[in-house]
Image (cartoon, rainbow, N blue to C red):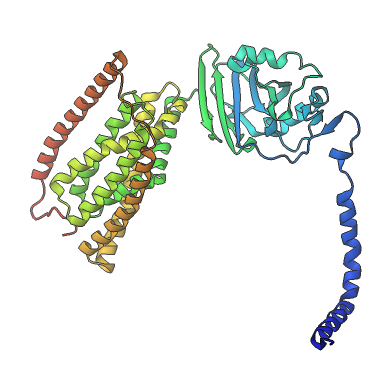
Amino acid sequence: MVNHRAMAWIRRRIAAFGRRWPVYRRIVPALSVVALWAAIPGPATAMAGPATLRNAAHEIPASVTILAFLRPEAERLRVVMRVPLESIRDVQFPLFGPGYLDIAAMQPLLADAARLWIADYLEIFEGNERLEIVEIAGTRISLPSDRSFDAYDEALAHVRGPALPAGTELPWQQAMLDVLLEYRIASAASKFSIRPALSHLGIRTFTVLHFIEADGTDRTFQYLGDPGLVRLDPRWYQASVQFVKLGFSHILDGIDHLLFVFCLVIPFRKFRPLVAIVTSFTVAHSITLIASAAGMAPSALWFPPLIETLIALSIVYMAFENIVGPRLERRWLIAFAFGLVHGFGFSFVLRDSLQFAGSHVPASLLAFNVGVELGQIFVLIVAIPVLEWLFRRAVAERMGTILLSALVAHTAWHWMLERFASLREYDFQWPVLDLAFLASVMRALLLLLLIAGAVYLLYGWAARFAQGKPRGETSQAGG
């Protein structure tokens, strides 16, 4: 029995195909050409002979380590650099065998690769004048086991030395590209700076840069990604400006520090209460920040996650205290106690940045602290008027304090749990009773003595400050 519905559907499909045949007639030849083009072997597969070419579109390496030396000598500044060859992309690597690099065929390509992927991404300045590259004075392929870049003289001699033998069986993913760049300078005693933008070489790019001064002093810089303008031997005011910016940006970028300051000022927005609270917090974090920079903080791996957990705990505590009912007479002391914790948190950021201070570490520490204070003042200038408007126009002050503090406590509570979970992954080991342990105990006692002295001075100042409070001013700023 014939299914009439099925036959009717088939007839409609045939009719539709007939109506669209002029369109298909134009598309089918084009698709045939594309399929034929895809089937034809490209240069990487059609090349005959013992050597083949590596596909130019290989993936960006996940991790790249760059070793570099920069040294001014007479009228030339030399940059000797080593990068993994796999970080150089869009270059067809001549290969032979199962994937070995053809050293002889690769040698003519190295200068262009070094210019396009390295030299064009380096900006070097003598004073304020940008230097122009004179020449790419040397390039070569090296084995991954080569140790020439342990010292400048060895690296320079290695790059200028003979190439690897032509038959070296070196997988292209393991090869290293060594480059020698030369710039013309006016004097080796000038002040130099560099803006390296080499993070494009890998997803995670780590650089170790040695600046060899004219007198032979070696300044070592280690950084991830692109650090911006690096002054290799900054003057004190240049380092100070840089660290003021760093401290200011750290406050604005650190949401946990912002929330802590926000909790401090929600119930106390008048000038006099704020002076005592902010001063106490500033003195406290300055003590631990400087102490950490001086090497007085524990160096154990569990210490940074412990501090991060305590910072989250400090926010939770301040938020709960705002909910229960804050008391002005003790808030300066609580701000001091938690300020000690936050100071260690600031030091973790500062620790990796002090290498850019040159010989002006004390000035840079002071400048970083100034930047932190400027950031706090900026937050207060923005937050206080907003809170005043909110409590006057939108919600009653007590209810608003509870709601805002509850939101902050909820966020910080999750931070605390996550950070505590990370902290538990570290194995705590009791220290060995030796001279190193005794030295650390002495440093801790000295730090405790400084803290006790600061508390004593602040207590006396706070008492005199409270006695000078104008009549009628309440402890609750909004009351």
Determine the image quadrant of residue 400. bottom left
Q: In which quarter of the image is the C terminus?
A: bottom left
The residue depicted at 15 percent of the width and 32 percent of the height is 457
The residue lying toward the viewer, choosing from 58 and 133, is: 58
Q: Is residue 465 above or below residue 95?
A: below
Q: Is residue 255 above or below residue 443?
A: below
Q: Tell which residue pokes out farthest to the front in this image.
A: 1
The residue lying toward the viewer, choosing from 46 and 191, is: 46
Q: In this view, does 258 lie above or below 72?
A: below
The residue depicted at 66 percent of the width and 39 percent of the height is 60
For residue 125, side relative to residue 55 (left or right): left
The residue depicted at 22 percent of the width and 39 percent of the height is 336
Q: In which quarter of the image is the N terminus?
A: bottom right
Image coordinates for residue 278, horizontal then vertical, percent: 24, 43
For residue 438, side relative to residue 65 (left or right): left
The residue lying toward the viewer, choosing from 446 and 180, is: 446
Residue 477 appears in the rendering: no
Number of labels in the image equals: 0
For residue 472, side relative to residue 336 (left or right): left
Determine the image quadrant of residue 150. top right
Image coordinates for residue 133, horizontal then vertical, percent: 69, 26
Residue 133 appears in the rendering: yes
Image coordinates for residue 405, horizontal then vertical, percent: 27, 56
Q: In this view, does 309 lie above or below 217?
A: below
Image coordinates for residue 224, horizontal then vertical, percent: 53, 33
